[in-house]
Image: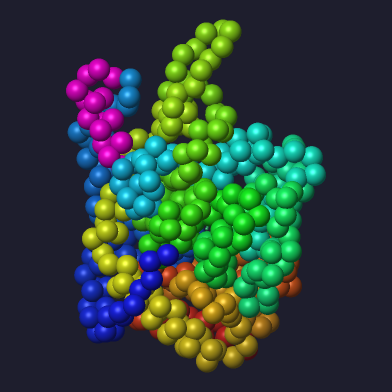
């Protein structure tokens, strides 16, 4: 990971956030007649005007199907789609654009690997390692692949604070380990996992690593080569892009050895009833007409991110996290769930004597959008012995004033329930 060393002064950061907010039309709207306070960014992020306009522009001026067309419009659409791939390559610092596969989202990226890689590599008695804090999207596909192959799922345990036990991982890794799949940033706890170290440990044991980066991409720069990740999954809608688009990064030599995930148009070299041969990367894994506009919109989202600075984003989000953590501690009976030393700006909490759902409903009346429930991480809730949490998740466009609104809202909930 590229690290941040020089934080900017807070006054500058707050001045910038006002400007940045103007890029997101929805943020100046209302909810339940109150100014919207959007703190549900881990479920989906808002979209800057540049992304929204890129979708409109594509449909208004370039819409055509890609790759097969000889006509001008199809060629323009193809160029725009492939330019988006190159943008994602740069965003991830992948070695080659062919290592960037456009998929439907992080869920499909992981299913692709579980299905295709699992088919050639998982055998009875083999082991696949996941962690105790995986999103269901990085758990259920491996359960399915293990069941098909007769392989076994192993789980890296975590502490009460929400930190993975790397000693336990070390003991788990061995010559039966076929793959390690781990989340970069936990959507329910905010934990930033030491993925560089996990990759190194797994590689020492000869196992490739898939990193679920759905929650990392909106908060920090990613360098798949420095990380040496074998696979990396991105979700477009979590990183200010459209829904229905995402990326699977994979090392070329692994992707080349893997069989197709879906059959259909565009992924073939030649088709006869006797034998079909497959197209080279990335087309082999992009059967059918892709979400062309979505890919272009995701390209616009990473362009937008490049126009900000990661130093500023990380400094500002860290400030929001610290400030919110500090302020929420004043609410009687409130306990923050997930207190890892390295956290992204995600705060899960429980309030003694109050169902998480009621917290969400009452805050909603004040225009404050948070998420309540298990956040697609039921095993995390089981591990911590709680049914659900309320979760406020921040993006770089959130403000200290919005944290104040959240804290006031939770104080009101506290007052209602005594
Ligand atoms: C949202 C999320 C996913 C699923 O991503 P989609 O693109 O919505 O399929 C996977 N993992 C984590 C950690 C997530 O937060």
Residue 239: x and y in percent read 39, 56
Say which of 158 and 401 sits in front: 158
Q: Quadrant of residue 24?
A: bottom left
User: Is residue 188 in the magenta section?
Assistant: no
Q: Which residue is at the far top?
A: 273
Residue at position x 70%, y 57% in the image? 173
Q: Say which residue appears at 73% left-offset and 50% top-offset.
A: 175
Q: Residue furthest front?
A: 204
**Residue displayed at 55% across by 70% down:** 191
Q: Quadrant of the N terminus?
A: bottom left
The relative height of residue 391 versus residue 8 in the rendered view (above or below) is above
Q: Relative to 416, does residue 369 appear above or below in the rendering?
A: above
Name the magenta segment's main secondary structure.
Answer: helix
Image spot of residue 10 (x, y percent): 28, 84
- Nearer-the-camera pick, 106 or 192: 192
- The answer to whether any part of residue 322 appears in the image is yes
Residue range highlighted in magenta:
69-84
Residue 132 drawn at (x, y percent)? 68, 63
Depicted 118 relative to depicted 353: above or below: above
Q: Nearer the viewer, residue 68 or 117?
A: 117
- Can you see residue 38? no
Identified at 52% across, 48% down, the residue is 230
Q: Is residue 249 left or right of residue 18?
A: right
């Amino acid at each position: 990971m590229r690290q941040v060393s020089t934080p900017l002064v807070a006054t500058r950061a707050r001045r910038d956030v006002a400007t940045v907010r103007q890029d997101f039309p929805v943020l100046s709207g209302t909810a339940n007649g109150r100014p919207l306070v959007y703190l549900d960014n881990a479920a989906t992020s808002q979209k800057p005007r540049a992304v929204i306009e890129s979708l409109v522009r594509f449909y208004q001026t370039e819409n055509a199907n890609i790759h097969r067309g000889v006509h001008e419009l199809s060629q323009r659409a193809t160029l725009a789609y492939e330019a988006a791939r190159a943008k994602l390559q740069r965003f991830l610092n992948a070695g080659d654009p062919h290592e960037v596969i456009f998929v439907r989202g992080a869920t499909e990226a992981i299913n692709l690997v579980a299905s295709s890689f699992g088919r050639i590599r998982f055998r009875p008695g083999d082991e696949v390692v996941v962690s105790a804090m995986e999103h269901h999207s990085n758990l259920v596909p491996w359960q399915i692949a293990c069941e098909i192959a007769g392989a076994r799922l192993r789980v890296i345990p975590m502490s009460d604070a929400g930190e993975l036990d790397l000693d336990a991982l070390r003991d788990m890794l061995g010559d039966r380990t076929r793959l390690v799949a781990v989340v970069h940033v936990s959507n329910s706890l905010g934990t930033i996992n030491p993925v560089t170290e996990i990759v190194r440990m797994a590689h020492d044991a000869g196992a490739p690593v898939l990193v679920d980066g759905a929650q990392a991409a909106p908060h920090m720069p990613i360098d798949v080569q420095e990380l040496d990740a074998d696979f990396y999954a991105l979700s477009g809608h979590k990183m200010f892009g459209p829904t229905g688009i995402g990326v699977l990064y994979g090392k070329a030599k692994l992707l080349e050895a893997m069989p197709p995930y879906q059959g259909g148009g565009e992924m073939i070299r030649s088709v006869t009833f006797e034998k079909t041969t497959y197209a080279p990367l990335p087309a082999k894994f992009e059967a059918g007409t892709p979400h062309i506009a979505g890919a272009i919109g995701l390209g616009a989202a990473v362009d937008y991110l490049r126009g900000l600075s990661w130093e500023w984003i990380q400094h500002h989000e860290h400030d929001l996290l610290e400030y919110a953590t500090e302020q929420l501690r004043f609410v009687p009976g409130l306990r923050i769930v997930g207190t890892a030393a390295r956290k992204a700006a995600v705060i899960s909490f429980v309030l003694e004597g109050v169902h998480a759902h009621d917290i969400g409903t009452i805050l909603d009346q004040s225009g404050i959008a948070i998420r309540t429930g298990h956040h697609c991480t039921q095993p995390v809730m089981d591990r911590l012995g709680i049914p659900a949490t309320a979760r406020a998740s921040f993006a770089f466009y959130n403000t200290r004033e919005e944290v104040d609104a959240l804290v006031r809202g939770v104080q009101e909930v506290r007052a209602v329930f005594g």
